[in-house]
Image: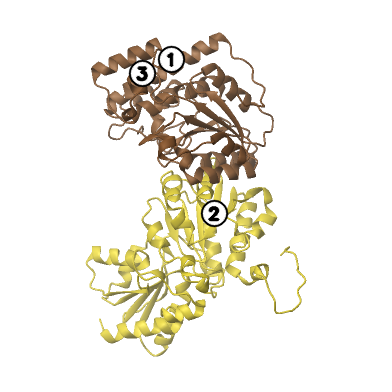
Amino acid sequence: MATQQIQRSAEQSWTLLDLLDQAPGLIALSDTLVEIAEEGAPVVALTGDLKYSNGLVRFAERYPERFFNMGISEQNMVSTAAGMATLGLTPFVADFASFLPLLCCEQIRTDVAYSQLPVRLIGHHAGITLGFYGTSRHATEDLAVTRAIANLTVVCPTDASMLAASIRASVGWEQPIYFRIGRGREPDVYDPENLRDFEFGRAIWHHRGVDAVLISTGSMVSPSLEAVRRLRDEGHDVGMLDMHTIKPIDRQAILMAAAAGSPLITVEEHNVIGGLGGAVAETLSEKGSRSRLRRHGIPDVYSLIGPPTHLYRHYGLEGAGIEAVIREELEKGR
Amino acid sequence: MSTATTQAAVDAKTIEQLEERARFIRSEVIRLISIAKVGHYASAFSCAEIIAALYYGAMRLRRGEPDWPDRDRFMFGKGHAAVALYPVLADYDFIPTDVLDEYTRLGNPLGDHPDMTKVPGVDFSSGSIGHALSAGLGMSLAGRVQGRDFNSFVLLGDGEQNEGQVWEAAMSAAHHRAGRVIAIVDRNRYCLDGEVDQVMGIEPLAEKWRAFGWEPHEVDGHDVGALCSLFRSLAKRQDPTVPAVVIAHTVKGKGVDFMESEIGWHLGFLSPEDEKGALDQIEAGNGRSS
């Protein structure tokens, strides 16, 4: 990083700029944008006074003429990106997930999605990851909002490697996309080599199982895998599916998960209404599935303030919490 | 009026042509709305000279080439006046003329608000007040990335000045030195519920734009010669870094006396009998305020 080193009186002090190198997901965001730009993709990047928070400063240093800091004017930023896309550019617009799809919902609908412009919206720090910064900074409605917007593809990359793979997959994708990411510090789940055939709308099976099947997305894949592996080690035949694309949802994979009548458990860092759980419920009920569905996530409340790890524990969205939910479903049987 | 730009006078023949085109726009508005059986006559009439001066006097266009990338762009904030644009797009062979004859009917690409995915030459879809200036800014910034020097003309309503996003875009365009963005405020003084300055006052408007870093101009929005001269001078600025706004003082419903005096004509329908009277007035060019 070419960021300036600042003299400090104590070694333990740190600033926002020090965090940049500690977030592999955000490094992957900028580095992949630079890579596809170097390969000829007409990338421009926009943010609203958040280039350090989302790491786009790295892209800005490489391509200053293609980076636009739009200030704290998010609605203007989204409509401006739409205008840019009319000339064939591919704008990547990054902002907090608590603002981008909610504050700019109407601009996303009318200017981006209705107009079928290939704008890429990146809602970062989604879910409850901003912890004690306040409930207003939590984004637990963004999937419900974006999923209801026609023409919009909605993707929740699991880790840095999948974020890179999904940005690559977006090259040539004609529809606008909402990428929902965390704060870039999600544990590695994938090796880039394993994502060579990554496709939007095609979920990734980690384990097949019949006692219960987890369907998780984004930041919840890693703790879900942790829980599933513990139970499998105990001999429970628990399946696990990474549903990285919320729209178009992989209906075939959902129906395969439900084929044996196994209980399904959706896990998302989002309100249980309208996101992954909602999408799976729609698919199951339309097909008349025998499978019971447990939607695990934020239970339609405004999340509490607290350190992120405490919040994940409070809502049962860490490995142990997810494991407890699976055990409850296993006890109920099929 | 306030201008630092050198303006060349427009010759009498051009003025006559532009006035004829404004009459053409108004009469086509009446014809199209007679097909839809409801429409925004008054909002379209207040900007008829503005559109005539832009499309027939100032913009860089090529007949039959809506996709020419260096074409000047035009978009509406007040998209409900698009019925005034469609006849011009047909006249430029951007859309087939017979599409006009089916205006708003099931499956026709032309609606009350314009849709860029359906209508060649419509540079941006509208329907939501307050977005267009941002879109015009985006086009201009993209033009800079691509090395193109087209202008983006954005027609805003005066009621639209109430929208916060207009001022976000104004701040942003000045900050990004987007001098190829030219905003036009159709200052017809009325929004839906009555006088703009009674519903939500916007004055002092020119001072607001100036404070946001723009170069404001004021003009009689029905004087095609003044409009054409001003638009041409703004369009031809060399490497402009300051965006310009033209506050065009207009009359809502201009050209038809009963529409000029009755705010209900923001939206309405003319019976065939009244339609004839309106067309006669337009042809004679003798609306009440003329």
Q: Colour of chain B?
A: brown
Q: In the picture provided, is B205 more to the left or to the right than A107? A: right
B278 and B264: which is toward the camera = B264
Query: Which residue, given by chain and number where applicable, does mark 3 sit on?
Result: B256
Residue bearing mark 2 = A93
Q: Secondary structure at mark 3?
A: loop
In the rendered image of the structure, the colour used to display chain A is yellow
User: Which corner quadrant of the image does residue B146 belong to?
Assistant: top right
Look at label 1 and name its amino acid: Ser
Instruction: Read off the residue under disc 1.
Output: B290
**Image quadrant in which you'd find residue A238:** bottom left
Q: State the residue at coordinates (40%, 86%).
A: A232
Q: Residues within 10 Å of mark 2 (few under 14, many from 20)?
A: many
Q: Is residue A173 left or right of residue A325?
A: right
CA separation, marks 2 and 1? Answer: 48 Å
Indicate the amino acid at tag 2: Val
Vertically, is A95 above or below B266? below
